[in-house]
Image (cartoon, grey):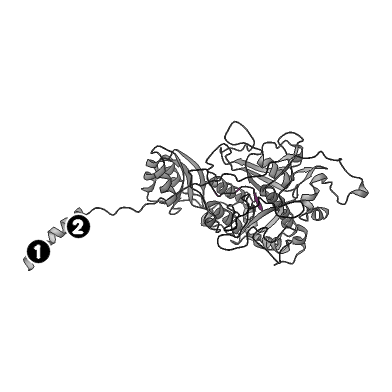
Amino acid sequence: MRRSLRLLLPLLAALAGSAPSPVPPRKTSAALDARLREAQPGDAHAVFVYFRDKAGAPAESVSPRALLRRARRGRAQGAASFEDRPLPEAYVRAVEARTLRLRQRLRWLNAVSAFATRQQIAELQALPFVERLDVVKGFRRGPVEPSEDAPAAAGRRAAADEQPHAINYGSSLGQVQQIGVPTLHDRGLHGEGVIVAVLDAGFDNLAHEAFATLNVLAAHDFVNGDDDVGNGGDRGEGSHGTATLSVLGGFRDGELIGPAFAATFLLAKTEDTDSETKVEEDNWAAAAEWAEALGADVISSSLGYLEFDRGQPSYSFADMDGRTAVVTRAAELAAERGVVVVNSAGNEGFNGSHNTLVAPSDGAHVLAVAAVTSAGTRAGFSSVGPSADGRIKPDVAAQGQSVKVAGSRAGEYRLANGTSFSCPLTAGALALVLQARPELSADEVLALVRGSARRAATPDSLTGYGIVDAAAAVDARRP
C-alpha cells in the first residue's frame, strides 16, 4: 500500500501542474456584453472603465467655496472624501493607451469613459486595477410641444399706479407669479450671491438682449472639450440652453424676467445634438463634478436619460429607483455635498401601469419638476411617478406650457412647452430661497419647498406636492 501511494503522489502532482489556470472573471456588464454581441469587431463603443482603487492618487483638491457650501448645506459636513481624490494618472494613461479616445474623467465614480473596440475592451479587462466595464448610456429627447412666436410686448412699462411690482415683467409675469417669485423680488431678493449651474444643450444666443446683465463665472463644453458653449464648427448646437437659461436668469424690462436674474451662472454644454445615439450621461456626470468644484449652489438640468435610439442599451422605468442610472448617482453625490439639484421630470406623459420619469429626476435628493399650464392644471406631456421604489415623484410643479423664452434671433421671444422650462423656473425660485435662508441645508431647502407647495397635504404621482410657492418656502419654519 505504501509503495502504491509513493507511485501515485508524483502522478497527482503532475496532473495538478498540468491543470488549466483559473479563468479570470468577466468584468463586462450584461448590457455591454449584449452590445458587443450585436456589433461588428471593429465598432467603437462608449464605455465606462471603473477602477478598483485610487492608489497613488494625489490628495483631494476642493475649492474653498465648495468646502464652505458643504459645511453649511451638505451631508458630508464639508470634509473632502475618497470621491474627491483625483484619479490615479497611471491608471488613466494605461486606459488611454488601450482605447481609441478618452472621453471624461469621473473622480466621484472612480472611472473614466472612453471609446474602445471589442479587442481593446478585452485588453482593458486584463488590467489588474480595472474593476468593471459598462456601457455609457444616453437619451433620445422625448416629445416636446412645438414652440411658437410670442406676442409682441404691449408696452415697455406701465404707469406707476398701474404697476403692482417694482419690476415690469411684461407678459412673463404669469409664469413667475404662479410660483411666488415677484413677492420675493419686491423684498430685494434676485439671486445675488448664489451660483447656479445650467446643464443643457448649446447656448446659441448669449448676445440676446435678455442676457445683457447676465453674470457668467465659467462655461465649458463637455461634448467637445473646450470652453465655447455656443454654436460653432464643432459637434452639437442648438437653442435649448438659451431658452432654459433665459427663463431662469434673463432680464429684459417689460419682456422677460427670470427668478434669479442677479445670480452668478455656470454654463455647461452636455448634450451632443448631432448624435443619433446620444452617449451623454458621462458628460452630465463630469459637468456636475465641475460645477460642484466651482462652488455651485444650484444645478438646473433640463435634460433626462431614459432610452437610446433603436438598437442601443437603455434604462427602463424599473431603473428609476434613485440608485441605478449613472447620472442619478452623480446627482446624488452633488446633493450630498450640499448642491440643490433640480431636474425636469420628463416629457414622456402618462402611463397607467408604471412611471415615465427620466434620470436623474428619480434621485431621492433631486427635485423633479412637473409641468402645469398657466391655469395650474397638469400638462398632458408631463412625466408621472412614483419612482420605482415607491417614492413621491415628481416632487413639485411649475408652468411648462406657453412659457415665454428668449429666441435664437436678436430681440426674438417665443412661447415654449416642456418640463424643460418648468425646471429652470423652479431652480431660479430655489436660488431665491437659498439667498433668503442661507442657514438651511440642501435637504432642508427641498423639505421647505415640498412642504410649502400647493398640494403639500395631498401629494400624488402627477404633480407631486404641487405648484411651487417660493415666498411661502422663505417664510416657512425651518424643518
Query: Magenta stretch containing residue 442, yes or no?
Result: no
> Where does the magenta region start and end?
295-310
Residue 335 place in picture, x, y as percent: 61, 57
Quarter holding residue 240: top right
Residue 282 falls left or right of residue 425: left
**Looking at the rendering, in which quadrant would you find the N terminus?**
bottom left
The prevailing secondary structure element of the residues shown in magenta is loop
Which residue in the protein does label 1 denote?
A: 6
Q: Residue reaching furthest right?
A: 161
The disc at residue 288 is none
- Name the secondary structure under disc 2: helix
Badge 1, how many Cα within 10 Å: few under 14, some, many 20+? few
Which residue in the protein does label 2 denote?
A: 16
- Name the secondary structure under disc 1: helix
User: What's the amino acid at mark 1?
Assistant: Arg
User: What's the amino acid at mark 2?
Assistant: Ala
Of 34 and 225, the residue lying toward us: 34
